[in-house]
Amino acid sequence: MSQQSEWHTLQTALRTASDIAFLEERPQGEQAEVLVDALRRAVSAALALRDGPGDTGCSVHPYGPVDPLHGDKEDPLPPGWGRCLLCNDRRRRAGARRRSA
């Protein structure tokens, strides 16, 4: 998920938890489960925000593999390509299909 998406998830989860936590009566049963789920989502989103976008810097595959050609001076990647091996591989395959067509 992107940082913006994680931020939105955190806000939504905290609002849900806050709504339940400040009810007149103590939450029980299904309400208590919803509260626990909201707090788990909030913690997960907060950890993702803390950890940043991952090694690849990719919004789609933040923790994916880094392209070994990234930073290679002898065989550089085309301009605009990032560190994400998965995205770069998709670009390579798309380019190969265009050349063969």
Image (cartoon, rainbow, N blue to C red):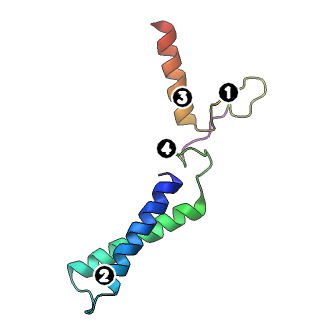
Q: Which residues are magenta?
A: 64-68
Q: Which residue is mark 3?
A: 89
Q: Report the residue marked by disc 4.
A: 60
- Furthest residue toward left: 29
Instruction: Tell me the CA gap for discs 3 and 2.
Output: 46 Å
Residue 73 lies, in percent from the top left, at 78, 27
Q: CA distance from mark 4 to mark 2?
A: 33 Å
Task: Report, in whole angstroms, how far the alpha carbon at label 3 lies from the one at label 1.
Answer: 15 Å
Secondary element at image label 3:
helix
Instruction: Give the label on residue 79, or none.
Output: 1
Q: Is residue 39 visible?
A: no
Circle 1 Cα neighbour tier, 10 Å, few/some/many (<14 / 14–19 / ≥20) = few
Amino acid type at image mark 3: Asp
Q: Nearer the viewer, residue 55 or 4?
A: 4
Q: Amino acid at mark 2?
A: Ile
Judged by depth in the image, the label closer to the viewer, 3 or 2, is 2
**Residue 14 lies in magenta, yes or no?**
no
Task: Choose top left, top right, bottom left or bottom right for residue 23.
Answer: bottom left
Q: Earlier in the sequence, mark 1 or mark 4?
A: 4
Percent x, y of residue 98: 48, 12
Q: For the residue marked with disc 1, what is the amino acid?
A: Pro
Say what amino acid the circle numbered 4 marks: Val
Could you tell which of marks 3 and 1 lies nearer the N-terminus?
1
Residue at figure coordinates x 28%, y 74% from the top left: 34
Q: Give the SS element for disc 1.
A: loop
**Residue at position x 50%, y 28% in the image:** 90
